[in-house]
Image: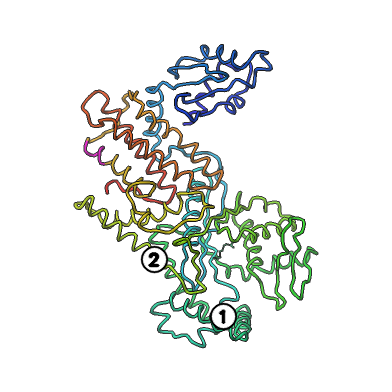
């Protein structure tokens, strides 16, 4: 329920001879200051046609627009300010939410079309980084928001499971590796080999050549190389899956870079026939001068494919197989140039759908202001982070509610939710600082704060044995009105989050709604046995529905008790 639309319909009914509905809708504003009303309508636009000053128009218009859904309509300067009838709005909004339940805010935008989402995409034989966590939670939320808007989101895990680094890893394993050690502790052991390789290669450049050679053998299907590669891959997937299980997130398809090995020839043929390939020091490149971009390196002098070659094949495969309306890439900001080049090459090849490829970048994760780098072996093991967060949540819950039945489950929902919310709280382009204690606070702008607010509404409803009725909602106080207005705004919020591919639009909204609810809770005696009781409880129920649905769109669970 869109308050702007609601007001615009009303205003339009009085001005149909002068403005179209779209024009009216384009003019209505939500004032920043409460004293200026819930809706404001500026009268500058038709001053010319009416040959009157905007101030005069406003004062003539105001009385004609009063009535039904508005308590008060005032002309203030060139504006008409509208104050909704509180009981009217509360009744409309609360009943709409109680009827539609979790479908409140569903939008018909996608018409069932597909959106592919390049999602998570960690690199085999390396730890799942905090950067990949961002791709995982941001991509997951964009998928959920898209589904709510009637798209069909398809998450694809573009695992980094191909490239020269696997040649290097094979060299390192054959020189210094131990089968037992890797079986016991796969990721840290493989990482050790990776670090060792880079240290040694600084002294001994021949190692790099050996690495390239082994990768070449891998690309040619060499048995030993393939066996080692599959083994490293399996072990890595096992450990990534533990993280996905904890987060409660998964891809529709696991199609890593290696998936495209037998699909590279199509793009290679297209490129060969396009006349776009040029030789540059033995390598083959596509120039992107017209886009002011550096040239894209497509094929190395030894014929090996590159990251972008595989991404070209990927883009074409996704278009052919999923016929996407949009193709999203939830990948860090440091790869912006890569995605611009990718799009540039596809454009030059004449693929119009390249315009529908959207890189949704995000900022770095830092710890104490410092960037984390795997090369140097400095790592944060995400699985440990999540488990630590769950443990801290358990402690906090135990202090607050020692008799809670399903403590373990709730601790998991809160601990994991805290990490997810922290990631999705600010604009995705912002850098985020990783600090578990801050994430887990029950106050302030945290996941647990919103979950706790929701649990509070549920506990009051339980205490009151709330049963839904069709009774007219009679709320007319300022506190409940703020909650009502915030709830009414939810569909618009969902739409904006989709438009910007920005989960933080939802998370910030949830903070606002929780704050409005908590001031309501602080000022009004909800359980007072009077005529308004059922109305107040119904508002709590509606609040809980929207908080739960909003959290769901972020990939976070909403325990009913905590
Ligand atoms: N594996 C890559 C990395 O960790 C991310 C892959 C992003 N997706 C893509 N289609 N290039 O840097």
Tell me if 155 is positioned left or right of 296 in this view: left
| x and y, in percent, of residue 541 in the image | 32, 36
Q: Residue furthest bottom?
A: 175
Residue 187, relative to residue 114: is it above or below?
A: below
Residue 157, relative to residue 284: is it above or below?
A: above
Which numbered dot is residue 383? Answer: 2
Residue placed under numbered mark 1 in the picture: 168
Q: Residues within 10 Å of mark 1 (few under 14, many from 20)?
A: many
Of pointers 2 and 1, the one earlier in the residue sequence: 1
Q: Which residues are magenta?
A: 459-463
Question: Label 2, label 1: how many angstroms apart (C-alpha)?
Answer: 26 Å
| x and y, in percent, of residue 516 in the image | 37, 35
Residue 130, relative to residue 113: is it above or below?
A: below
| x and y, in percent, of residue 414 in the image | 33, 53
Q: Residue furthest front?
A: 369
Disc 2: residue Cβ within 8 A of ligand 1's nearest atom: no
Residue 499 on the magenta span:
no
| x and y, in percent, of residue 430 in the image | 52, 52
């Amino acid at each position: 329920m869109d308050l702007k639309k609601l007001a615009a319909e009303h205003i339009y009914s009085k001005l149909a001879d002068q403005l179209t509905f779209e024009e009216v809708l384009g003019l209505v504003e939500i004032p920043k200051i409460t004293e200026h009303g819930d809706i404001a309508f500026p009268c500058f636009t038709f001053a010319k046609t009416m040959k009157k000053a905007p101030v005069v128009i406003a004062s003539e218009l105001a009385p004609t627009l009063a009535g039904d859904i508005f308590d008060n309509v005032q002309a203030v300067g060139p504006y008409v300010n509208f104050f909704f009838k509180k009981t009217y709005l509360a009744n409309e909004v609360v009943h709409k939410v109680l009827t539609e339940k979790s479908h409140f805010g569903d939008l018909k935008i996608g018409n069932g079309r597909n959106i592919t989402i390049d999602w998570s995409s960690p690199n085999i034989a390396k730890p799942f980084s905090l950067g990949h966590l961002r791709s995982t939670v941001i991509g997951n939320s964009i998928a959920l928001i898209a589904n709510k808007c009637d798209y069909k989101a398809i998450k694809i895990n573009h695992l980094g499971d191909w490239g020269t680094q696997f040649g290097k890893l094979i060299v390192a394993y054959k020189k210094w590796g131990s089968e037992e050690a890797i079986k016991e502790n796969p990721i840290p052991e493989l990482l050790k080999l990776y670090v060792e390789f880079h240290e040694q290669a600084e002294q001994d450049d021949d190692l790099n050549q050996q690495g390239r050679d082994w990768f070449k053998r891998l690309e040619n299907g060499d048995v030993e190389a393939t066996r080692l590669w599959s083994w490293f891959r399996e072990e890595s997937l096992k450990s990534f899956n533990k993280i996905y299980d904890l987060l409660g997130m998964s891809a529709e398809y696991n199609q890593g870079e290696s998936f495209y090995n037998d699909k590279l020839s199509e793009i290679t043929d297209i490129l060969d026939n396009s006349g776009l390939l040029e030789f540059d020091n033995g390598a083959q490149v596509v120039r992107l001068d017209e886009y002011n971009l550096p040239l894209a390196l497509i094929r190395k002098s030894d014929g090996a494919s590159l990251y972008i070659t595989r991404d070209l094949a990927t883009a074409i495969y996704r278009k052919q197989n999923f016929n996407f309306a949009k193709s999203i890439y939830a990948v860090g900001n440091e790869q912006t140039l890569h995605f611009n080049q990718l799009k540039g090459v596809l454009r030059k090849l004449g693929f119009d759908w390249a315009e529908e490829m959207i890189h949704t970048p995000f900022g770095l994760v830092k710890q104490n202001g410092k960037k984390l780098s795997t090369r140097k072996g400095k790592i944060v093991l995400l699985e440990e982070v999540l488990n630590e967060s769950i443990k801290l949540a358990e402690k906090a819950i135990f202090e607050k509610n020692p008799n809670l039945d399903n403590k373990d489950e709730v601790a998991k929902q809160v601990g994991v939710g805290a990490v997810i919310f922290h990631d999705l709280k600010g604009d995705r382009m912002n850098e985020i600082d990783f600090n578990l204690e801050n994430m887990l606070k029950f106050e302030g702008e945290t996941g647990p704060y919103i979950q706790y607010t929701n649990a509070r509404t549920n506990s009051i409803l339980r205490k009151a044995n709330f049963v839904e009725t069709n009774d007219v909602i009679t709320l007319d106080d300022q506190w409940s009105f703020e909650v009502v207005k915030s709830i009414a705004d939810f569909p618009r919020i969902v739409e904006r989050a989709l438009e910007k591919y920005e989960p933080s639009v939802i998370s910030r909204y949830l903070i606002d709604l929780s704050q409005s609810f908590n001031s309501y809770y602080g000022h009004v005696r909800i359980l007072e046995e009077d005529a308004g009781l059922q109305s107040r409880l119904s508002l709590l129920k509606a609040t809980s529905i929207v908080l739960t649905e909003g959290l769901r769109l972020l990939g976070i669970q909403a325990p009913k008790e905590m």
